[in-house]
Amino acid sequence: MGHYVLGHVWKGLIFSLVVMLALLYLGYRTVGWVLARWGQRWGINALDDWASLPVLLLLLSVFSFLSDPITNAYSRFTEHQADVYGVEVTHGILPDAAQAAADSFQVEGESSLSDPIPTG
């Protein structure tokens, strides 16, 4: 409920689109340089050759991997906001809102068969 009330759905979509656009722009700016440097060795003569598509996909994968800390930080930020919202909404309604939240997380973990004490 917190994600809906705080507008995280739309903000998340916009954030994802901005990150995707940035990754595509980085890929566009970098693929020409990569092909100029190693294209002859790989037998790829120009960017309009279909053989350059795997190079672009490789670059997008690398840039996506490098952007994961940013996207994970945003995800954790929104999850924290939604959790705080949930605790604040139940404050005063439940005698111990924190314990109710902990109990609900325990029930959710049991229903999804999560390991309560992962060994790493």
Image: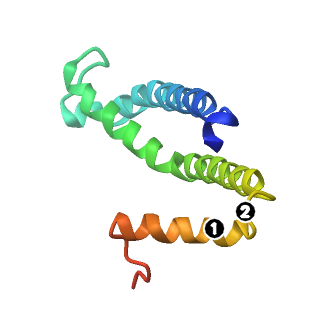
Q: Position of residue 56 (x, y in %)?
A: 34, 31
Name which of mark 2 and mark 1 comes first in the sequence.
2
Mark 2 → mark 1, Cα distance in angstroms:
8 Å
The residue that disc 2 covers is 94
Give the residue at x 45% y 63%.
108
Q: Quadrant of the N terminus?
A: top right
Q: Position of residue 32 (x, y in %)?
A: 41, 25
Q: Nearer the viewer, residue 76 or 97?
A: 97
Q: Quadrant of the C terminus?
A: bottom left
32 relative to 96, above or below: above
The residue that disc 1 covers is 100
45 relative to 66, above or below: above
Tag 1: amino acid:
Ala
Q: Nearer the viewer, residue 96 or 36?
A: 96
Q: In the picture, residue 55 is in which quadrant?
A: top left
Give the residue at x 41% y 81%.
118
Secondary structure beneath label 2: loop
Give the residue at x 45% y 49%.
65
